[in-house]
Amino acid sequence: ETNEVMRVDELGLVHGGFIFSAADFAAMVAVNEPNVVLASSNCLFLAPVRVGDMVSFEATEHQKEGRKRNVTVRGFVHDIKVFEGEFKTVITERHVLRLDLLKNLEN
């Protein structure tokens, strides 16, 4: 459920960042792997969300290729689709903060 903290303006519009964050979370839950990270996304904000709206998200993992997973996420307020996005994720061998991403770089 959206709340006052998410408000952008005096009319009660919810900032899209909160909608995106919830959609990203739904994508990660759909993959359901401990070391999944977001690689990219392509999202559409289809209708405004207002403070007090309950946004329901559905996420479907639809493509698996090695460690890569693609997830479609849709967000609804009642029966109105307010969000749709494609999330490309990667499952890393270790936690992303434990990866030695700089090991091949020279100073």
Image: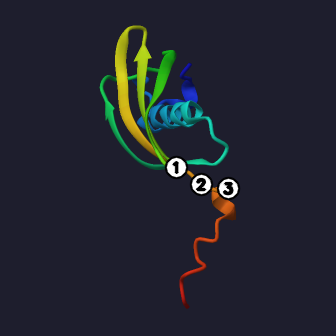
Name the outermost residue toward the front: 66
The circle drawn on residue 43 is: none
Residue pointed to by mark 2: 92
Q: Where, quadrant-wise, is the C terminus in this rendering? A: bottom right
The crowding category of the residue bearing disc 1, from other C-alpha atoms within 10 Å (few below 14, some 14 to 19, many at least 20), is few
Question: Distance from label 3 to label 2 (Cα)?
Answer: 7 Å
Residue pointed to by mark 3: 95
Indicate the amino acid at tag 1.
Arg
- Residue 39 on image: x %, y %: 46, 51
The image quarter in which residue 10 lies = top left
The crowding category of the residue bearing disc 2, from other C-alpha atoms within 10 Å (few below 14, some 14 to 19, many at least 20), is some
Helix, strand or loop status at disc 1: loop
Name the outermost residue toward the top: 79
Rendered residue at 45%/36% (across/down): 20
Helix, strand or loop status at disc 2: loop
Q: Please name which of the two marks, 2 or 1, marks the residue nearer to the observer.
A: 1
Q: Where, quadrant-wise, is the N terminus in this rendering? A: top right
| Marks 2 & 1, CB-CB < 8 Å contact | yes
Question: Distance from label 2 to label 1 (Cα)?
Answer: 7 Å
When the figure is inspected, residue 81 is found, relative to residue 42, above or below; the finding is above
Q: Looking at the image, is mark 1 or mark 3 earlier in the sequence? A: 1
| Marks 3 & 2, CB-CB < 8 Å contact | yes
Question: Distance from label 1 to label 3 (Cα)?
Answer: 14 Å
* Horizontal side of residue 36 vs 24, given as left or right: right
The image quarter in which residue 79 lies = top left
Rendered residue at 49%/49% (across/down): 66
Q: Looking at the image, is mark 2 or mark 1 earlier in the sequence? A: 1
| Marks 1 & 3, CB-CB < 8 Å contact | no
- Residue 2 on image: x %, y %: 53, 22
- Residue 41 on image: x %, y %: 39, 44
The circle drawn on residue 67 is: 1
